[in-house]
């Protein structure tokens, strides 16, 4: 089981290894728990029990994808040392490597394999002395206390923690398997529009070269729309999800600032690297709206499309779930990507 702890909607998937293939056996969407002011392990524990039940209590093993505020993720360059030492280097020098003090954080690292160019592996970046090449590493960190809370919640729900992964990298992990050619050979942006926040990751020939978080999400769009329409939140949500033609220009006015913020991230990368981002692949609940995708396309002047993060999975879904997967798929991206960490 892999669970994406979204701030509005919890998304869960059940994946099973079948020989060479991975099968999608079930999925579930549940309202996220509403924490009073502060996170509660008890509340999360009850919630995870409901999630496991919704998936049919098939296994004890659970992987959690945690929110954008709960983890830092960056690509860094580190000397050729074992991962266990990398973790300590990051812990003791977070300001130098991650540009911020991160007291009481713990870290993990993934070493990117050297890039293949024209059949030869590319030169790794060198140190100042010119002797030993450095490694390109994806570093992720989270507060030790937060990890303890997640583990306690899992155990109290009668489950076994398998992996805890930053939700931010979910889309990239799913994309690598869903579109391996594009992943390996192109420069694309993966955008996940959440409830209060949106993440953008630029992937350049399989490498995560930029990630940013923008404080605009589906909730921001609905709140702004409610103001503009002088309507309630529920009415505005209905107009947004129902793609009401009357509300189109008001919706557009809310989507434009998101498009601008995302465009700024693309500009930053494009000016630095002097090459364009060719496609934008959008996931998250808001990507279910064709109208909003069109609006983002107009604002960013790059094609924005939704994609199917379950395309590489064998479908083993029961009745109604099989019927609805095409619509729900884009919202399951982070959960599918997180699940891959467990295989
Ligand atoms: N068909 C639709 N059209 C437009 N918006 C939609 C549609 N379906 C869902 N949404 C929006 O998607 C949002 C929830 O998306 P999602 O589940 O990706 O967020 P989350 O993962 O809980 O949040 P976060 O990632 O920020 O923690 C809601 O604001 C909802 O209005
Ligand atoms: Mg989300």
Image (tube, rainbow, N blue to C red):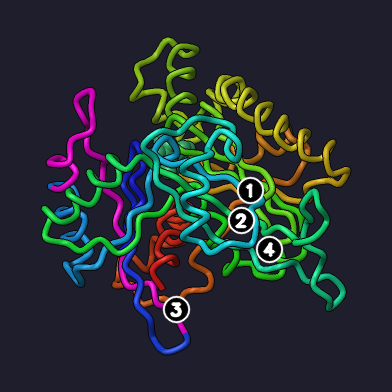
Q: Quadrant of ligand 1?
A: top left
Q: In front: mark 1 or mark 3?
A: 1
Is the C-beta separation of discs 3 and 2 under 8 Å?
no
Is the C-beta separation of discs 1 and 2 under 8 Å?
yes
What is the secondary structure assignment of the residue under circle 4?
helix
Is 235 magenta? The answer is no
Q: Residues within 10 Å of mark 4 (few under 14, many from 20)?
A: many
Q: Quadrant of the C terminus?
A: bottom left
Residue, disc 4: 183
Dot 1 or dot 4: first in sequence order is: 1
In the displayed structure, 324 sits above or below 304; it is below
Residue, disc 3: 314
What is the secondary structure assignment of the residue under circle 2?
strand
Q: Residues within 10 Å of mark 3 (few under 14, many from 20)?
A: some
- Disc ID at residue 137: 2
**Structural distance between the alpha carbons of marks 3 and 2:** 31 Å
In the displayed structure, 265 sits above or below 184; it is above
**Structural distance between the alpha carbons of marks 4 and 3:** 20 Å
Dot 3 or dot 2: first in sequence order is: 2
Q: Position of residue 72 (x, y in %)?
A: 49, 41
Q: Position of residue 60 (x, y in %)?
A: 19, 68
**Structural distance between the alpha carbons of marks 1 and 4:** 20 Å
């Amino acid at each position: 089981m892999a669970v994406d702890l979204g701030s509005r909607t919890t998304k869960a998937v059940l994946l099973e290894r079948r020989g060479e293939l991975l099968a999608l056996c079930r999925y579930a969407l549940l309202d996220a728990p509403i924490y009073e002011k502060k996170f509660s392990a008890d509340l999360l524990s009850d919630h995870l029990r409901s999630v496991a039940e919704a998936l049919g209590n098939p296994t004890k093993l659970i992987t959690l994808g945690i929110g954008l505020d709960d983890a830092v993720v960056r690509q860094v360059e580190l000397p050729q040392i074992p991962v266990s030492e990398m973790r300590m280097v990051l812990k003791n020098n977070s300001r130098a490597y991650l540009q911020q003090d991160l007291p009481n954080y713990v870290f993990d690292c993934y070493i990117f394999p050297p890039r293949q160019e024209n059949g030869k592996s590319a030169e790794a970046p060198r140190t100042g002395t010119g002797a030993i090449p450095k490694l390109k590493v994806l570093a992720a960190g989270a507060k030790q206390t937060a990890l303890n809370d997640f583990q306690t919640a899992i155990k109290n729900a009668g489950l076994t923690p398998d992996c805890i992964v930053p939700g931010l990298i979910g889309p990239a992990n799913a994309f690598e398997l869903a579109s391996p050619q594009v992943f390996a050979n192109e420069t694309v942006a993966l955008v996940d529009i959440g409830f209060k926040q949106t993440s953008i990751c630029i992937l350049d020939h399989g490498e995560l070269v930029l990630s940013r978080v923008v404080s605009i999400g589906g909730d921001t769009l609905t709140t702004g729309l409610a103001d503009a329409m002088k309507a309630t939140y529920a009415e505005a949500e209905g107009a947004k999800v129902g793609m009401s033609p009357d509300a189109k220009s008001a919706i557009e006015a809310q989507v434009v600032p998101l498009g601008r913020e995302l465009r700024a991230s693309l500009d930053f990368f494009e000016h630095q690297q002097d090459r364009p981002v060719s496609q934008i692949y959008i996931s998250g609940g808001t990507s279910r709206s064709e109208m909003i995708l069109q609006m983002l396309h107009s604002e960013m002047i790059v094609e924005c499309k939704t994609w199917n993060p379950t395309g590489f999975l064998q479908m083993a879904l029961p009745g109604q779930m099989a019927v609805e997967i095409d619509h729900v798929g884009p919202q399951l991206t982070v959960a599918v990507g997180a699940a891959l960490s467990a295989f």
